[in-house]
Image (cartoon, helix red, strand yellow):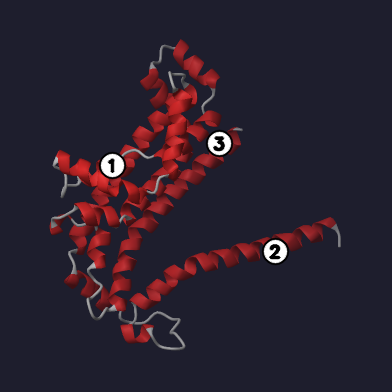
């Protein structure tokens, strides 16, 4: 077998493996759609029905009748968007400073930052609730947004990316032109950090959207419930309409898919542009 034939065989094997991985990744979403379009009795049939049914609109109607879906979705969009914007802003500033500037106790502060990775988030629940109660924020959106406005993972990710993407020569040229810290951050660092910012934005939005425990703890007013808390009410005490639950879950996933494709497109475009420049 010559080199060209070997290359073709490996190309075919690679594509088959990639298609297999894609199929495995997509199947849970397809299966969720199948269950959302059937009745609960159909879901427990054996062998299972693998094709979509005809009850999707009926199940979606039950979701709208059972919970305040539009209100909780609007609340979740507000919290997720504001949290994502704040994380991108504060994390990028901190990462830029850690990566390109010297200040007292810089290395010690970064080590402390990394140590926070090892602390389970559940351990901070009670202290965070006490702080929110002292501020008088329990039951308000501030209690959801402010504690999540900065995270160590984002600072670490952007700092590592900024070390390679933002060159010292470029910053020196900006300083010679009279740029202060903020102009260096906004006009030099932010454009070069766009691929990492796009990834962090997707990651943060999905986390804020899917957060269930903290909103359940701090949001007392039913009118301010987020989507995940509202959907949890679809589970009955004695009986659960699983097809309705799957329809609600399907509706909750659609915005995430849209955000993922929008962010991934920007992420890949910036990476490709950076590769061409290099």
The residue that label 3 is drawn on is 274
**Is the residue under label 3 in contact with that under label 2 (CB below 8 Å)?**
no
For mark 2, give the secondary structure: helix
Q: Is residue 140 left or right of residue 17?
A: left
Question: Whole-percent x and y of residue 175?
Answer: 45, 13
The residue that label 1 is drawn on is 147
Quadrant containing the C terminus is top right
The residue that label 2 is drawn on is 12
Q: Is residue 37 left or right of residue 190?
A: left
Task: Give the residue drawn at x 16%, y 40%.
Answer: 134
Mark nearer the N terminus (2 vs 3): 2
Question: Whole-percent x and y of residue 270?
Answer: 50, 40
Mark 3 crowdedness (10 Å alpha carbons): few <14, some 14-19, many ≥20 = few
**Is the residue under label 3 in contact with that under label 1 (CB below 8 Å)?**
no
Disc 1 to disc 2, C-alpha distance: 48 Å
Question: Whole-percent x and y of residue 12?
Answer: 70, 64
Depth order, front residue of 17/43: 43
Task: Give the residue drawn at x 28%, y 49%.
Answer: 125
- Residue 111, can we see it? yes
Question: Whole-percent x and y of residue 39?
Answer: 31, 83
Disc 1 to disc 3, C-alpha distance: 34 Å
Determine the residue located farthest toward the right in the rendered image: 1
Disc 2 to disc 3, C-alpha distance: 29 Å
Mark nearer the N terminus (1 vs 3): 1
């Amino acid at each position: 077998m010559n080199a060209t034939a070997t290359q073709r065989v490996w190309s075919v094997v690679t594509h088959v493996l990639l298609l297999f991985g894609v199929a495995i990744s997509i199947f849970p979403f397809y299966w969720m759609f199948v269950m959302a379009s059937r009745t609960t009795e159909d879901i427990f049939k054996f062998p299972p029905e693998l094709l979509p049914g005809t009850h999707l609109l009926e199940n979606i109607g039950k979701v709208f009748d059972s919970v305040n879906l539009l209100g909780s979705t609007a609340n979740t969009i507000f919290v997720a968007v504001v949290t994502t914007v704040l994380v991108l802003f504060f994390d990028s500033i901190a990462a830029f400073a850690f990566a390109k500037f010297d200040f007292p106790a810089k290395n010690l502060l970064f080590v402390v930052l990394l140590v926070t990775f090892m602390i389970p988030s559940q351990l901070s629940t009670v202290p965070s609730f006490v702080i929110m109660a002292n501020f008088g924020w329990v039951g308000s959106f501030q209690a959801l947004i402010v504690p999540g406005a900065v995270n160590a993972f984002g600072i670490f990710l952007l700092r590592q990316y900024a070390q390679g993407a933002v060159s010292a020569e470029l910053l020196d040229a900006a300083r010679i032109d009279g740029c202060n810290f903020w102009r260096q951050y906004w006009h030099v660092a932010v454009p070069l950090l766009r691929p990492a910012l796009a990834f962090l934005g997707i990651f943060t939005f999905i986390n804020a959207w899917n957060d269930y425990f903290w909103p359940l703890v701090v949001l007392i007013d039913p009118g301010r419930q987020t989507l995940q808390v509202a959907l949890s009410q679809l589970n009955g005490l004695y009986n659960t309409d699983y097809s309705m639950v799957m329809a609600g879950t399907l509706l909750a996933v659609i915005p995430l898919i849209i955000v993922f494709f929008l962010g991934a497109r920007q992420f890949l475009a910036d990476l490709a542009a950076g590769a061409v420049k290099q």
